[in-house]
Image (tube, grey):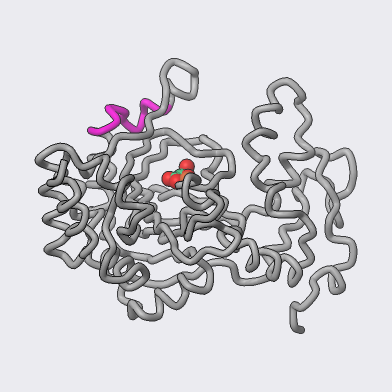
Amino acid sequence: MSLTNAEEITGEIFIPSARAKRRLGTFFDEFSRGMNPFGLIPTFGVADANTPVAEIVRLFDKFNIVKVRGVYSAKESAELQRLCILASKLKPLDYLKIFKGEGRGFTGGSPVLNNKNFWPYAANKHVREIVQKILGKNATEFGSSVAAHYSARGIHRDYRQLCEKAGSAYHVSNPQKRIVRVLHYCASENMQGGMLGVIPFSHDERLFAEQSKRVGNKRPIEWFDTHRDELAKLRTTKDFSVVDEIDRHIVWVATDPGDVLITNSAMLHCGEHMMSPRYFFVSTYTDVNSETLPMAAAQVKSETAKEYHRHLLSLGFGGSKALLKEVEKK
Ligand SMILES: O=C(O)CCC(=O)C(=O)O
Ligand SMILES: [Fe+2]
């Protein structure tokens, strides 16, 4: 059976959730939250660290999100978690305090610019081979962050100043360029890694329209971008029907410790509900051009930051050359 029009096959599939006030197809809310039309088709790539780079890049070109399994050993993932604990000053069980409202989760920093221990993760052999093949010779890493007991729960894009800027080569209406975000969810052995939620194909409006037609989604791309505002309203309205409607379209990509997600910053995405200890490191890659050079150069101030870019350059990130030259000019 070809999935050219899921609506024709499944009949009335868009029944909004109103938390058990009505049936959602066969089920009430106790067993369902409605149907995810994007669950009817492949929406993300899955590969192993030893999958040929060309194949991983083919998957990335197709979906703009690929899970690469086993990039690190479980031990190396635990070590990355330890670095995130040090950077955030939040231990796993500090989650309990945060849950009770006695503290806050952490997100931020530019860990690679002040701590060399993060370099083997941002410039991991598999990661750099994949990223350099996606972005070309003039790529570099230009934005890293650590998160602890934090989740970017509302659906959003990253680097909106590029992918939502009219006239930019990164604009979602007709993207010519991409910013690659690598998510390194980390944990100790035999613990869950982390999940990223995505609205598939939303990095490119034309592709989104095409794939939406295929699965019978009639919601426009802008509607998914209202998730953050709708979440903010819940506290007073206590009416989950709109949020549930958006949530049911999210595709969840789960990782084990040692897996990484290669993603496109322009794709609408979100984190899980904050329900247990959670750590990740994220590194961001672009090709260095007139749009990205000023953004990247502004961050390179310290000697460690310059050393980082000399290190990246030695590993084939050619974009660090123009970046270092720009920084020297100042
Ligand atoms: O909380 C999450 O897992 C999502 C992270 C995210 O949005 C990001 O790092 O860009
Ligand atoms: Fe994000």
Q: Is residue 91 magenta?
A: yes
Image location of residue 70, percent across then percent down: 33, 65
Q: Nearer the viewer, residue 136 or 112?
A: 136
Question: Quadrant location of the C terminus?
Answer: top left
Number of marks in picture: 0
- Highlighted range, magenta: 86-95
Image location of residue 152, percent across then percent down: 50, 39
Q: Residue at x 80, y 74 (%)?
A: 5
Compared to residue 290, the image places residue 318 above or below, namely below
Judged left or right of residue 210, residue 85 is: left
Q: State which quadrant residue 141 falls in.
A: bottom left
Q: Residue at x 15, y 53 (%)?
A: 325
Q: Nearer the viewer, residue 56 or 9?
A: 56
Q: Residue at x 48, y 24 (%)?
A: 99
Image location of residue 55, percent across then percent down: 40, 80
Q: Nearer the viewer, residue 38 or 170?
A: 170
Compared to residue 164, the image places residue 89 above or below, namely above
